[in-house]
C-alpha cells in the first residue's frame, strides 16, 4: 500500500480519505489515498503522483472492484468475484458503445467539436493521442478490456 502525502494537509487521522486504484503509462497498478476526487485531480495536474515501481508521473484512475449491497440477505454472500465484475463492465461497454478501433482519437475529436453525431464510442489510443484528447478537453475513461478466451 502506498500513500501520497501533501504537506499542507491536517493530521491524516482527521481527514476522511478515499483510495483510488491507479495505473501508470507503463501498466503498473498501484493504490493511492486522497482527501477526495478534487485532491487527486490537483495532485495529478501538478505531477506529484508517481508510480512506485518506475516513477512515471503519467497516471490514470482505473476501475476498482466494488460491491453494492441490495439487502440484508446478501450480507454473508461475500465480495463479488473480480472477474465477474470486469466481465459485466466489459459486456456493458461492448453492448452500448460503438467500436471505432484505432480511429478513437479522430472520432472523439469530431464528436467533441460537433462534426459528428454524439454517441458512445470505444476504441484504442496511443499515449500521445490520449494527451491530445486531454489537451483538447475531451473527457474519456480508460478501461482495460480483457480478451475473452475461446474454450
Image (tube, helix red, strand yellow):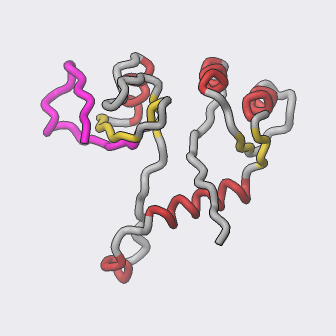
Counting from the top left corner in percent of width and height, residue 51 is at 36, 29
In the picture, residue 91 is in which quadrant? bottom right
Decide which of 1, 108 is in the foreground and name it: 1
Q: Is residue 133 above or below residue 85?
A: above
* Residue range highlighted in magenta: 1-22
Query: Is the magenta region chiefly helix, strand or loop?
Result: loop
Residue at 29% from the left image edge and 38% from the top image edge: 33
Counting from the top left corner in percent of width and height, residue 119 is at 78, 43
Residue at 45% from the left image edge and 62% from the top image edge: 82
Q: Is residue 31 above or below residue 148?
A: above
Q: Is residue 139 above or below residue 90?
A: above
Counting from the top left corner in percent of width and height, residue 60 is at 48, 33
Residue at 85% from the left image edge and 38% from the top image edge: 117
Residue at 60% from the left image edge and 50% from the top image edge: 145
Q: Is residue 16 magenta?
A: yes
Counting from the top left corner in percent of width and height, residue 78 is at 34, 73
Q: Is residue 115 magenta?
A: no
* Rendered-image quadrant of the N terminus: top left
Q: Is residue 108 left or right of residue 136?
A: right
Q: Is residue 123 left or right of residue 118?
A: left
In the picture, residue 45 is in which quadrant? top left
* Rendered-image quadrant of the C terminus: bottom right
Amino acid at each position: 500500500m502506498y500513500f501520497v502525502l501533501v504537506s499542507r494537509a491536517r493530521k491524516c487521522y482527521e481527514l476522511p480519505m478515499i483510495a483510488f486504484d491507479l495505473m501508470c503509462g507503463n501498466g503498473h497498478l498501484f493504490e493511492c489515498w486522497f482527501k477526495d476526487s478534487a485532491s487527486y485531480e490537483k495532485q495529478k495536474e501538478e505531477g506529484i503522483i508517481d508510480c512506485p515501481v518506475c516513477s512515471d508521473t503519467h497516471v490514470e484512475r482505473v476501475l476498482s472492484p466494488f460491491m453494492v449491497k441490495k439487502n440484508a440477505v446478501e450480507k454473508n454472500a461475500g465480495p463479488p468475484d473480480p472477474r465477474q465484475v470486469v466481465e459485466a463492465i466489459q459486456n456493458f461497454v461492448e453492448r452500448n458503445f460503438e467500436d471505432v478501433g484505432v480511429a478513437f482519437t479522430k472520432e472523439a475529436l469530431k464528436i467533441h467539436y460537433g462534426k459528428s453525431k454524439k454517441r458512445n464510442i470505444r476504441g484504442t489510443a496511443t499515449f500521445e493521442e490520449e494527451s491530445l484528447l486531454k489537451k483538447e478537453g475531451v473527457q474519456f475513461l480508460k478501461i482495460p478490456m480483457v480478451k475473452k478466451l475461446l474454450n
